Image (cartoon, grey):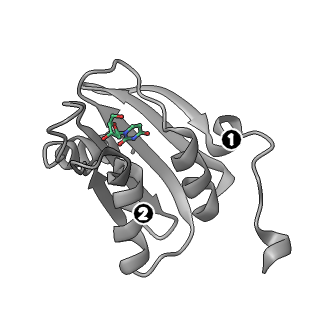
Amino acid sequence: MSHDLFLAAREAMAKAYAPYSKFPVGAAVRTTDGRVFAGANIEVASYPEGWCAETTALGHYIMGGGGEIAEIAVVAERMARVTPCGGCRQRLAEFAGAEAKLYLCDDAGVVETVTIGQMLPYGFEGKILK
Ligand code: THU
């Protein structure tokens, strides 16, 4: 059911606060037990202080109880197939295993499906820090 996750991401994108880049992004994550959390990018006049749609979605996910992430959808109004930035790949990999699916979308639906492991090969893992 990747399309409903895409729809959640697109709905979130409509709430983006992106007056500076004018590049709205939406993201939605679904846990293995079926909960969906979405978010949009939020920009700030001091540009580096803004953050990505994936980060907003992860904030909602943590506040909603966390758990294991099974699927993620990302969509950007102005890009045919947006991919998460490097920082968001690392953030997503914190909570989603290498096999979790990542749906790269355009404004009509999923264009390509990859895994978190494919998006972040050789990623830094925090196991040793725990
Ligand atoms: N952006 C995201 O929300 N997610 C990404 O993975 C890439 C970039 C946002 C950040 C900023 O508000 C705008 O896109 C332009 O970089």
Quadrant where the N terminus sits is top left
Spot occupied by residue 106 in the image (x, y as percentages of width and height): 32, 24
Identified at 38% across, 68% down, the residue is: 59
**Residue type (three-letter) at the residue carrying disc 2:** Leu
Residue 102 shown left or right of residue 62 in the figure: right
Q: Earlier in the sequence, mark 1 or mark 2?
A: 2
Gap between marks 1 and 2 measured at Cα? 17 Å
Q: Residue under circle 2?
A: 58
Say above or below: 61 vs 47: below
* Total numbered badges shown on the rendered structure: 2
Q: Residue under circle 1?
A: 120
Residue 119 shown left or right of residue 109 in the figure: right
The secondary element bearing badge 1 is classed as loop
Say above or below: 61 vs 15: below
Identified at 21% across, 43% down, the residue is: 13
The secondary element bearing badge 2 is classed as helix
Give neighbour class at mark 1: few <14, some 14-19, many 20+ (Cα, 10 Å): some
The residue positioned farthest toward the right in the image shown: 128
Closest to the observer, 10 or 84: 84
**Residue type (three-letter) at the residue carrying disc 1:** Leu
Q: In which quadrant of this rendering is ligand 1 seen? A: top left
Say above or below: 67 vs 71: below
Spot occupied by residue 9 in the image (x, y as percentages of width and height): 28, 45
Residue 79 shown left or right of residue 121 in the figure: left
Spot occupied by residue 129 in the image (x, y as percentages of width and height): 80, 75
Closest to the observer, 18 or 9: 18
Give neighbour class at mark 2: few <14, some 14-19, many 20+ (Cα, 10 Å): many
Quadrant in the rendering for residue 86: top right
